[in-house]
Amino acid sequence: MKLLKSLALATLILAVAAPAASARKEKKKTYNHVTVEIPKVEKTVIPVETEHTQLVLMVQENGVLQTLHYGIRIADPQAFKDFRTLRSHDNGSGPMAYPTTGGRYIGEPALHVKYADGYHNTQLYYTGHDVRRNGNVVTTVVTLKDYVTLLEVKLVYDAYQKEDVICMHSEILNGSKQAVELQNYASGSLYLDADKFYLTHFHGGWADEMQMDGEVLTHDTKVIESRRGTQATQCNNPSFLVSLNTDRLQENTGEVVAGALAWSGNFRLSFEMDESNRLNILAGISPFASAYTLSAGQTFTTPDFIYTFSGRGAGQASRNLHAWARNYGVYGGGQVNPTLLNSWEGAYFTFTTETLLRMIDDAASMGLEMFVLDDGWFAKDYPRNNDDAGLGDWEVNTAKLPEGIDYVASYAHEKGLKFGIWIEPEMVNPKSNLAHAHPEWVVQSPGREMLQSRNQWVLDMSNPAVQDFVYGIFDNTMQLAPNIDYIKWDCNRIVSDFGSEYLGGDQDRFYVEYTQGIYNVMRRLRAKYPDTIVQCCSSGGGRVDYGALKYFNEIWTSDNTDALTRVYIQYATNLIYPACVMASHVSAVPNHQTGNVTPLKFRFDIACSGRLGMELQPKNLTEQERALADRCIKSYKQYRDLVFTGDVYRLASPYDGDYYALMYVSQDQSRAVVFTYCTKYQNRAIGGHPFRMDGLDPARKYKVTELNVNRSCWWGSGKTHAGDFLMNGGFNPLLLQTFASAVFYLEAE
Ligand code: GLA
């Protein structure tokens, strides 16, 4: 047995020793009877570094660019220059930085191109690289080329130093004289080496988004893909965490790579563990029905693949992503957005001007800062009194609101509130003037039934005329009253039977150009309306991704407003997306989605861990409930900057037990807010539950105060405690009942 092993090893070593010589011999390549020269290159290490992490790219002698390391930053990355593995080339290529179909590569390709002559092979060789520094961001661009087909790929890595985040994308240039077809065109590839990989990802459905799922990866390929077109993230999300050498996700220990794709359309993440146990992660636009024709001289730019490495568990990975998101990834990230009352669950489609004015009165008297008029305010010929008519006809329904929007908005402004309004611009009801005027704008496939969902059709955003129209909806809505402060942009169905009259014979472009169409519109709108707060809603969390968040300030996390379900949705959302984007509303009980009855305090304490809002009819609250609401809203204002800008520390996962706890700590560690919740009745013998606070300065003393109660559930409330005491088990609030919850505010002395 031993002998066999050493024989096998000898063969492997021989196989490794061989390529250097054969690479030199293979220098000349013959293609269609043409011989091309592959220029000789020097072995070169290209480190892509942040303060604590490092991606080591390596140009091999044969010109192939490989990924040799992603993890903790090593002081001298040049040490990788002589790094060898015993991998036999007979079994395919090494870890190519951007694997392509062709040559020895037999795994999942980042890039798969079909050329005009019908051939599918692409072999990319290094031609040069360039490093630029712009403050906190170091950009490395590596250029690769196929000398036969003249296809060129630029790999662009933006390394965010302080945040320890790398964003990469590719730019694919067709340097040939004929069109080529991109069949796979991922944004990037990431190779990881470990004995075991535990993948955490997200699944769900309407009103049940972002449920955590996980598994130890086995050999072959795990794919997470959305083919929904619009609402791409309702059932899964273009994001993940991979924990190395473990079979579970750990909050504070272990190596974790977390990543996300900035794309709001069909996406594909693949995790391929090959026969050498190496994991290749690819993230990109889904190639489903989307082979992309690239004409001669044209470049396709893929969306960003954002990733981070943490040597201290999922917690640090989230903090890295959140910091990047606040500083770069989210429109208006890090800004504190107003609390609000949204009309939807309190009034649905049934309201008059009077209903809205009284809701505004109540919102103002409770200390909320904005009123948002949701669905139901528009369309005259086909009034929007339920969800089967009106979408597309964006004029005020004066039968319902005779005084117009201006009147309501001005009333809100007089009361000191901001004003927001709902639109769903990508959609049309068959019962609308728009559907009659522009049937060709509807996504459809000729001769087939135009399938409806929520009684509506999707408008073809790949068509520039539709983009102009959608731009106009937003723009005109903004003119309905001076100072509209907030737009809720909704998108309530998926694409089915896709087809675009505009694209004619090139339907493969539909899904990509639909998403690019939204981005085109948002870019134009942001140029004109830089300060408007825009919420990204898609039946709740159907469009939760960093592509959308470049333009939107926040997401409607879920249509599910039940505080208990929100525990799980918000916990998981927060693994990838920061609290500042997470809209969270207090609604009525029994909850309209689940029927659950939870205490008002529990509902507030959940909503206050994100961007607080209310979504109910305030006049239905009792006096006692109003008093509690006033108190919770007031105290939220005292600490909400921590929710929007602080670092999150998750203290207990509801997926692991009956408690959920998290805290946000200011960057200077002088203030913090701690949220604790219990989801199940606890045996009285258990007593106080010890949570370990985190992120505090161990040496500093903090005054801890439980908020919004007359008697605290923790013996230590109102007193001063050392950071190390709070972080090592001294904090044990009594949370014995189902839906018990407590919020604590910490201030350093
Ligand atoms: C979607 C949204 C809700 C609400 C309704 C209005 O379901 O997610 O918040 O705006 O549409 O029709």
Image: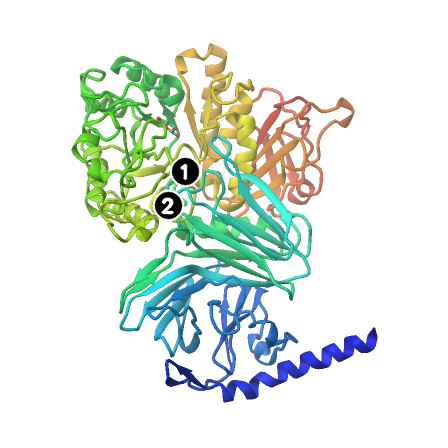
Q: Which residue is nearer to you in this view: 152 or 341?
A: 152
Picture disc at residue 548: 2
The answer to whether the beta carbon of the residue marked 2 is less than 8 Å from any atom of ligand 1 is: no
Tell me residue 1's x, y (percent): 83, 73
Q: Is residue 275 left or right of residue 556?
A: right
SS at mark 1?
strand
Residue name at image x 28 percent, y 47 percent: 517
Tell me residue 589's x, y (percent): 50, 17
Q: CA distance from mark 1 to mark 2?
A: 9 Å
* View quadrant of ligand 1: top left
| Residue 112, picture quadrant | bottom left
Q: Which residue is nearer to you in this view: 693 or 720?
A: 693
SS at mark 2?
helix
Picture disc at residue 555: 1
Q: Are marks 1 and 2 in contact (CB under 8 Å)?
A: yes
Q: Which residue type does callout 1 highlight? A: Ile
